[in-house]
């Protein structure tokens, strides 16, 4: 079966689950089942649950996972809403590979690409908010916030001003047009396309990407199992910061007020520990065969035996 997406850090993800006990493996970002199919092949004692908000991805994965259909269930929706509703237990392995898939990026009509004639960027094609509304209807202040906070664009004010000025002449209907506007503000010739960070900001807003990650981390914190391993792959610093900080919180034994003179909590509040201190990144070989792995960072956390 030809696959439209190469799974990143595959060997490293497989390794992170090498000694998980029997139970459910939840793939929160099923995509094209690149990770799921390999994990199910290698750890055939696991049951599988796949979640995605994209119908195209689910349809493809259903076929790809046909050999495992007896022990695989697929759910359509966002991971932050689906995970808390799952009744299957115990969950012993959980993966999320955040961001967009290669197919979403490459398919012109999805409007994620700089050259697209559409302005969409929805992972869930039935969602009500698309990039069109963000770009054409949000106030200048809101655009500034998105470009600054989610895109980390240095000239975010100038960029929001340029968008507002352009749309005053008529709606901005394509990603192509939007990237031309970015080029008038941000010089070409850097390591990345001038519109990259603006597109990242809009995509995060359209798909509530950071809110979803926070919701997922809350759901995991609320419901975790003995020896469960959680492996999360992030693609930019905003995502990685959320994961890093939450893992730090989960690994903290003392919950006393930092100003307190001495510890009174018993110092036994750690939920488990991170499997690696620093995030795992792609090898030279992987970078060569899959340039999209260059910004991927994998962090894994194992919940301890006596956790709830
Ligand atoms: C990078 S791809 C995953 C690729 C997959 N690991 C593979 O090997 O084929 C991310 C996928 O997660 C989905 N996704 C992103 N955010 C989501 C969310 N909050 N809830 C559910 N699915 C989400 C996207 O639609 C996309 O299909």
Image (spheres, helix red, strand yellow):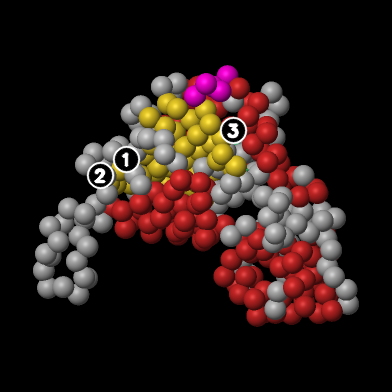
Name the residue furthest top. 67
Q: Determine whether the beta carbon of the residue marked 3 sits less than 8 angstroms from the nearest atom of ligand 1.
A: yes
For label 1, the residue is 225
Task: Give left or right: position of 125 versus 280.
Answer: right
Name the residue furthest right. 169
Which residues lie in the magenta part?
A: 67-71
For label 2, the residue is 307
Between the residue at mark 2 and the residue at mark 1, the CA separation in whole angstroms equals 6 Å
Q: Where does residue 180 sit, x and y in percent of width and height? A: 82, 65
Determine the secondary structure under disc 2.
loop
Q: Where does residue 30 sit, x and y in percent of width and height? A: 57, 38
Q: Residue at x 61, y 75 (%)?
A: 145
Displayed quadrant of residue 139: bottom right
For label 3, the residue is 33
Q: Residues within 10 Å of mark 3 (few under 14, many from 20)?
A: many
- Work out whether residue 95 or residue 83 is closer to the camera in this orientation and state it: 83
**Residue 42 - label:** none
Query: Mark 2 or mark 3, which has the lower sequence index?
Result: 3
Q: Where does residue 291 sit, x and y in percent of width and height? A: 64, 43
Q: Residue at x 63, y 29 (%)?
A: 62
> Is there any visible trace of residue 240 in the rendered image?
no
Between the residue at mark 1 and the residue at mark 3, the CA separation in whole angstroms equals 24 Å
Q: Residue at x 63, y 26 (%)?
A: 64
- Work out whether residue 45 or residue 253 is closer to the camera in this orientation and state it: 45
Between the residue at mark 2 and the residue at mark 3, the CA separation in whole angstroms equals 30 Å
């Amino acid at each position: 079966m030809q696959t439209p997406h190469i799974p990143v850090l595959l060997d490293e993800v497989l390794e992170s689950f090498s000694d998980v006990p029997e139970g459910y493996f939840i793939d929160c970002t099923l995509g094209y089942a690149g990770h799921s199919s390999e994990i199910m092949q290698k750890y055939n004692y696991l049951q599988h649950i796949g979640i995605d908000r994209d119908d195209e991805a689910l349809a493809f994965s259903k076929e790809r996972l046909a050999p495992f259909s007896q022990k695989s269930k697929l759910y359509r929706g966002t991971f932050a809403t689906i995970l808390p509703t799952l009744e299957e237990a115990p969950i012993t392995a959980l993966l999320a590979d955040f961001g967009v898939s290669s197919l979403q990026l490459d398919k012109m009509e999805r409007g994620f690409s700089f050259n697209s004639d559409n302005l969409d960027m929805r992972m869930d094609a039935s969602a009500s908010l698309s990039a069109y509304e963000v770009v054409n209807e949000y106030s200048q202040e809101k655009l500034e916030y998105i470009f600054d906070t989610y895109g980390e664009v240095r000239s975010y004010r100038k960029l929001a001003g340029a968008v507002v000025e352009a749309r005053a002449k008529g709606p901005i209907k394509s990603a192509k047009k939007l990237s031309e506007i970015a080029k008038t503000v941000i010089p070409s010739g850097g390591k990345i396309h001038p519109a990259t960070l603006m597109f990242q900001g809009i995509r995060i807003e359209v798909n509530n990407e950071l809110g979803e990650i926070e919701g997922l981390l809350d759901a995991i914190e609320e419901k975790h199992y003995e020896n469960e391993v959680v492996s999360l792959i992030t693609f930019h610093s905003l995502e990685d910061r959320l994961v890093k900080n939450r893992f730090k919180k989960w690994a903290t034994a003392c919950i006393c007020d930092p100003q307190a003179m001495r510890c009174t909590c018993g110092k036994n509040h750690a939920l488990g520990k991170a499997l690696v201190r620093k995030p795992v990144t792609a090898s030279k070989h992987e970078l060569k065969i899959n340039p999209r792995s260059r910004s991927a960072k994998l962090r894994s956390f194992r919940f301890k035996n006596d956790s709830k």
